[in-house]
Structures are given as C-alpha cells and as structure tokens.
Amino acid sequence: MRQRFGVVVTPQRDASLMLKGIQACFGYAGVSSIDPHITLVPPFNLDSSELPKVLAALAKAGSTIEPFEVELGSLRSFDSNGDVLYLDVRGGVSELEEVYCAVMNTGVFREIERAFVPHLTVAIGIGSERTLQAIGLSEPIRLSFVVDTLDVLAKVPGERWMLCASSILGWGSVKNISHLRVSFSREVGVSQGVLDAIEAELDDDISRSTLELLAARDNSKTFSVVIFRESEILGSVIYSYVHAKFAVIDYVVVFDVDNRGFGLGRAAISLAIEILRKDDVSYVFVRSSQSSYLFEQLGFVELNDPFYDELLAKLVTSGGNKFLVRELC
C-alpha cells in the first residue's frame, strides 16, 4: 500500500506548545493537520513495505551526528507574495545542514532542486498584507529546543500527519557484548546467556565476528533492531508499544535475498522479544502476512479473537487484518 511520508525534526513538547500558540494567532492556516516541525525531506510517496529500508538508512545517517540545539528567531516570508509565513533558524543552521546532507546522501530520497532553507512554518496562504504586517510588528522569539531524533511522519488519509517512527541521533550508548554490539538509549538488560543463545542460532556460514545487531529506541513507543555486517545494513526489525503490556512487530526484513536463510531475521526478532520481556510486556503481536512460518517457529500462534484483531487493525495501519501472538509472561 502506497502512503505519504515526510522526514522532519520536531521540537520537544514544551517548545511545540509555544509554537502552536503562535500558529493559533493565524488560525492554524495551512498547518492544522501537522505539528510544528522543520522539514528535511518534503512529502513523498512510498510503498509501506519499503519503509524499513528508509528507516534503516535514516538510522545509519544519524548514527555519527550528536544531538544539537536549534534556536528559532524572527518571522519571515520567502517572497513578496507572502504565501508562507515562517520562523527562521538563528542557531543550529550548520548542524541542520549537516543532518540534511547526511539524509540526502543515503540515496533513498530523490534530489530536491531548491536549496535547503531550514525554517518552521507558522502559516500558509494568509495573504501578503497580513504576512508583511506580522513580520513588521513581531519581535524575535528566540525559542530553543534540542534536536535528538530524525522523525518520519505518515499522512493518514483524511486525517493528520502522524509520527510513524524516529531514529535517535548518535545511537545512544554503545556496549560490546560477545560478538553482538548492542547500542541502546538505555540499559538493554538482556543477559549474556540470552545473547549467546541468540548468536548460537545463526548459521555458521554467516561470519559472526563481523555481525552487529544494533538495538535503538526511536522514541517512547517505537524501537528498532538493525542488522549490520561491516557497516552494510542487512535488515531490520521495527516494533512498537501499543499498550503497557502489548507490543506489535511492525516490520521484519532482510533486504538481500542472498542473506536470507541464515537466521538473521530470527536473531533480530529474538533480541527484540528479550528486550520486550525485560520491559514486562505480556503479549507480542505480528501481522499474519509477515513470514508466518518464521514467527510460528518462534512460538507465535494465530490470534482467534475478533476484539483484538479489530483493535490492532486500527492501531497498525499496514499489512493484513489478521495477527499472530506470542505470550511472554
């Protein structure tokens, strides 16, 4: 299913509320369906099955960039027509340009013809007179916030742009555990014995000494396990919390067919499950259309409960309407 996506950086909640207050002065003109943000990649169409590849590329692009501060300044407009009223960026311009270049250099996005001008849109289509009046009467706001994630937004048909996934800049802390390097924004808490067992499941034809499973918290609800070998991205597992006790595996993919069948996906799923177990998650769900045989080997069974099928179908927008489930407690 093709869907509309965009890549942005978003202010933290307190700064976002202040910015919404400024947008409210202009009736949220042109911005009512999206939260305050600075655009990196304008809206693009993508098949949902390709999203894991985009997320893995973004994670890699941001892995060497540390969080930084952005300071917003004065109201501006791009031209005399005043179609777009925005806040310019006073501080953090060079860092935003670095992030933009890293994202575009991933090769997964089309080249953008116009120059990158970091800004935060306040209103669209309010007319040149009102725009110029606002610029003339306003004082610089000098509002700062920390950029620590690259956020992917998805457009829900007929509704708002919603946060789809995030990648943490700099990956957080890094720990060396056996041959698996686990990078996480907090302590993973998975025992050495569990990691050894996961590694032992890998086929001997895969060079374990160069394999890396990077586990990163994308935001408060969404997590990723990305499989690397010598800096090459082999695949990923993306999962999210939909309830204190429930989690959904959204995507599992090993990109190159030549790398399939060696247990990479199984290892990544196993690590994700162990992290969820440590977080006291009781049930993990997955779309039945995703590698059912693999998940059945890992202890998932068909969910025969219309209530949960309907509930999860509303929470998870891609894939079929049937789910498999594994109980962790």
Image (cartoon, rainbow, N blue to C red):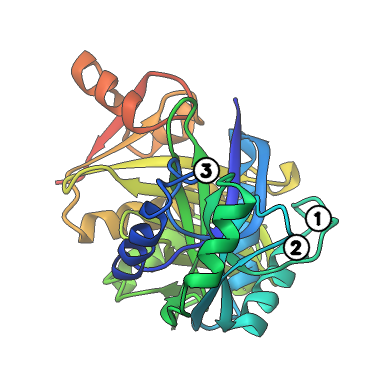
Residue type, label 3: Gly
Q: Label for residue 112?
A: 1
Residue 77 visible somewhere in the drawing: yes
- Which residue type does callout 1 highlight? Ile
Q: As drawn, is 123 to the left or to the right of 108?
A: left
Q: Earlier in the sequence, mark 1 or mark 2?
A: 2
The residue tagged with tag 2: helix, strand or loop?
A: helix
Crowding at mark 2 (Cα within 10 Å: few <14, some 14-19, many 20+): some
CA gap, disc 1 to disc 2? 9 Å
- Circles 1, 3 touching at the beta carbon (< 8 Å): no
Q: Is residue 24 above or below residue 251?
A: below
Residue 312's place in the image compared with 12, above or below, is above
Q: Nearer the viewer, mark 2 or mark 3?
A: 3
| Residue at point 51%, 31% (across, down) | 291
| Disc 3 target residue | 30
Task: Give the camera-side residue of 239 and 156.
Answer: 156
Q: CA distance from mark 2 to mark 3?
A: 26 Å
Residue 104 — which label? Answer: 2
Could you give the CA–CA distance between mark 1 and mark 3, rounded to whole angstroms? 22 Å
As drawn, 324 above or below 68: above
The image position of residue 36, as x and y in percent, is 45, 58
Could you tell whether 155 is left or right of 221 in the image? right
Instruction: Please identify the quadrant where the N terminus is shown.
Output: top right
The quadrant where residue 162 appears:
top left
